Image (cartoon, rainbow, N blue to C red):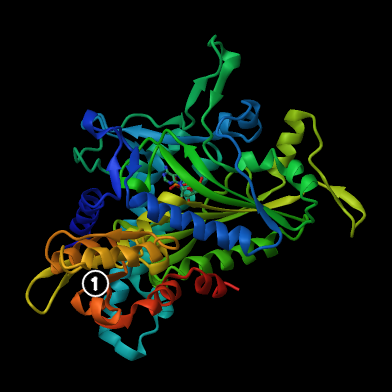
Amino acid sequence: MANQEDIFKNIISHSKEYGFIFQSSEIYDGLSAVYDYGQMGVELKKNLREFWWKAMVQMHENIVGIDASIFMHPTTWKASGHVDAFNDPLIDNKDSKKRYRADVLIEEHVAKIEAKIQKEVDKAKERFGESFDEAQFKATNARVLENQTKIDSILGRFKDALEKNNLEEVRQIIVDCEIVCPVSGSKNWTEVRQFNLMFSTSMGAVSEDSNVIYLRPETAQGIFVNFLNVQKSGRMKIPFGIAQTGKAFRNEIVARQFIFRMREFEQMEMQFFVRPGTEMEWYNYWKGARMKWHSTLGLGESNYRFHDHLKLAHYANAACDIEFDFPFGFKELEGIHSRTDFDLKAHEQHSGKKLQYFDPELNQSYVPYVVETSVGLDRLFLSVLSKAYVEEKLEDGTTRVALNIPSFLAPIKVAVLPLLKKDGLPEKAREIMNILKCEHACAFDEKDTIGKRYRRQDAIGTPFCITIDHQSLEDNTVTIRYRDTMLQERVAIDKLQQIIDDKVSIKKVLQSLM
Ligand code: ATP
């Protein structure tokens, strides 16, 4: 069996071959960590965005959406803390000249020690069988304890160093852990420096300091500055949420792993405004609700886990990530943060405008607390793609590559295939296509053998193929072939629409969230 790394490479080349994702400006050798979505990718991305939007906005009476601009008044980013504190600690290896995020080097080192512990646990589990008590084993086994102590010590020092912004200590941890550059294999490291991740540009004809504006590094601030506009014009009562999807930009230091870490990406965020003191209740509510949403994608519940933040951002009093098991391991897919009243208060101070809510039940005004859910659309796309991609050996010895994308998200829902290019079959197929295309994304394909055409549709994740043959002309029936089972059945043309509607309906998925 191919290893994860090979599979990931295959997924990347499959994405390109079938029009899901291209490197940006490829004819000029590309632009690092920037990608374009092709004809299939744009459909899958749109369907994912729509599913998120419907689940968030349409399904909640107290959540509304907005679409704020990417450009915002520069003071926004001063108030939010991004000008002063949106930094990553970077370190260079002097031999390979490669640049790394110091925190990532340390976290990866810790993950390796964690893997050692897991190995001991797995070995013991096999030895002791049914009677194995994992908690007791971890609490008593000498090797596990030794490694756990190492982890605790590294993380303790690291947390402390970050809190004190002590970059020398961060470097010292890397040195003490004997972390080597994966490229040169050397421990020849530079100092650790802070690097601001915001892109800036200038507005207007004259470029002076005062004209510097930023490309937003998160969509959230567009929501905060519009908090009162929405609350007043929509007569919203707390608790309520404002949702938004849109582009965000970060000058990432280490931009690898395909669309996982991009310099231009899309976020889907929802800020939920609550009464102060109730934020932990809502934080826990949204943790559960978001995990449930992810599980309806059917990618397997064991592929998700929560990860509590070690160091809280300057604005948060609780924060966790929903991590997903990507082909390169568990990594952040979505962040859930209890942002307190930090942002609204900061905007009050910097703008001199009150951003308060009058609570009629308490008969008092206050700055609401905020619970945020923030998921990267591109990472979500990668999660679906990486679990949907399958290479199967078939009984006849051939292999088939299929994308088992959940039907309601598939870029093309139905392919309409006349068996032959003659005898009136294409005309009959067009009639069917015309019925279905008003409702669903359809493809029409009359080239090559039917087997080849099925494979092409499997490769882009089309859940249903409709084949029109001579019998169709006689009795108005067609065969419907299912991507996942490859089974075919004969159905009446006038039943077709209902069958397809039912199978690709987003309605059932939304109902399962209630
Ligand atoms: P990371 O630790 O991976 O850099 P983050 O904690 O900085 O991510 P947040 O600021 O919480 O990320 O942003 C919310 C979401 O936006 C993330 O969960 C992720 O899905 C997405 N996201 C953030 N940065 C990127 C990026 N460079 N490329 C693609 N998606 C991103």
- Specify the farthest residue to the bottom: 130
- Give the class, few, some or many, for how many residues have Cα within 10 Å of label 1's Cα (few <14, many ≥20): many
User: Please, is residue 429 above or below residue 38 in the view?
Assistant: below
Query: Residue 137 location in percent, x, y?
Result: 38, 78
Secondary element under disc 1, as helix, strand or loop, is strand
Name the residue nearer the viewer: 447 or 339: 447
Give 33 or 427, whichever is nearer the viewer.
Answer: 427
Q: In this image, 217 relative to 286: left or right? A: left
Q: Quadrant of the N terminus?
A: bottom left
In the picture shown, does residue 349 fall above or below 487?
above
Residue visible at 14% across and 69% down in the picture: 451
Residue corresponding to mark 1 = 467
Q: Is 188 in front, or is 449?
A: 449
Towards the viewer: 285 or 233? 233
Q: Which image quadrant is residue 240 in?
A: bottom right
Residue farthest to the right? 363
Q: Quadrant of the C terminus?
A: bottom right
Residue 207 pos. (x, y %): 53, 11
Residue at 61%, 39% in the rendered image: 68
Residue 323, horizontal then vertical, whole percent: 44, 60
Residue at 15% over, 64% down: 422
Q: Check disc 1 and give the amino acid type.
A: Thr
| Residue 402 in view in this figure | no
Task: State which quadrant residue 203 falls in.
Answer: top right
- Left or right, 256 with reference to 212: left
Q: Is residue 31 left or right of residue 349?
A: left
Q: In the shown orientation, is residue 366 left or right of residue 38?
A: right
